Amino acid sequence: MSTVNFVGVDISPIYPTAIYPRNCNFYNENILDGVSQPDGAFDVVYQRNVTCGFTFEHWQKVMKEAYRVLKPGGYYECVESDISIHNAGPQTNLVFNHLKMAMAAKNVDPTIVRSLDRLMAAAGFKDVHVKEYMVPVGEWGGKVGSLWKQNLLAIMETVRPVVARAARINDGQAQEIMEAMVQETSVYKAHQVLYVVYGRKPL
């Protein structure tokens, strides 16, 4: 029976350091600088939640790197949102509008995730597919909605200083807005659209 090995890479040291499965290894690396793995090492490359920090050129670079480390016939999958909340309340819209303003100042366009299939094809991948999923935000959406709310709030906590600078408010005021955003999840049946894009490296 063959062994499946997992390699995780993140720019932040957020991975476990004491206890983790023996078939897992974690590396604190910036994928924009390239990763320390050899050519043709992986059957699958999975990437998610990088929309907030990637320019068009960054996307081109990381897709080229994914292509490099994949074995022929291997698959590359991206899971991203376009940083939009549908049917959201006013405070939620305010937070996300400021986040998008901060991204625009760094030449980051979150709507590019709707074109990842074309970028993937341009990078040389074949059999590229796109699937869109409507994910509820909040308890109204059951277990999935509750979990996605937790995920979203964790992300918002990391970008709170960015939102504060974009809105020209202090950290305390940004915290108040985000707390109001939490309350809105029980009133508005908001949702996010996730884009799942995957393709195959040719044999």
Image (tube, rainbow, N blue to C red):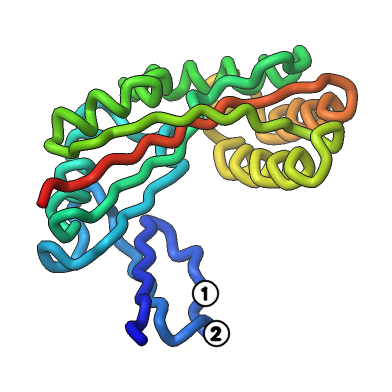
What x and y, as percent, mark residue 187? 89, 22
Q: x%, y% of residue 145?
A: 76, 38
* Res. 164 in view: no
Q: Quadrant of the N terminus?
A: bottom left
Q: From the viewer's perspective, is residue 24 above or below residue 123? A: below
| Marking on residue 19 | 2
Mark 1: secondary structure = loop
Query: In the displayed structure, does residue 72 sit left or right of residue 109?
Result: left
Which residue appears at 57% of the width and 20% of the height?
A: 84
| Viewer-proximal residue among 180 and 118 | 118
**Which image quadrant is residue 69 in?**
bottom left
Determine which quarter of the picture holds residue 56.
top left
Residue 121 vs 76, above or below: the answer is: above
Mark 2 Cα shell of 10 Å, populated few (<14), some (14-19), many (≥20): few
Q: Amino acid at mark 1?
A: Pro
Which quadrant holds residue 113?
top left
Q: Are marks 1 and 2 in contact (CB under 8 Å)?
A: yes
Question: Residue at horizontal 13%, vertical 56%?
Answer: 72
Direction from residue 176 to residue 65 in the image, left or right: left
Q: Is residue 44 above or below residue 4?
A: above
Residue occupied by mark 1:
16
Callout count: 2
Q: How far apart in space, not on screen, are marks 1 and 2 (Cα)? A: 6 Å
Q: Amino acid at mark 2?
A: Ile
Residue for point 23% across, 28% down: 119
Q: Position of residue 127 (x, y in %)?
A: 24, 36
Secondary structure of the residue carrying numbered label 2: loop
Q: Position of residue 34 (x, y in %)?
A: 18, 54
Query: Residue at left 13%, top 53%?
Result: 68
Rendered position, 149 above or below 106: below
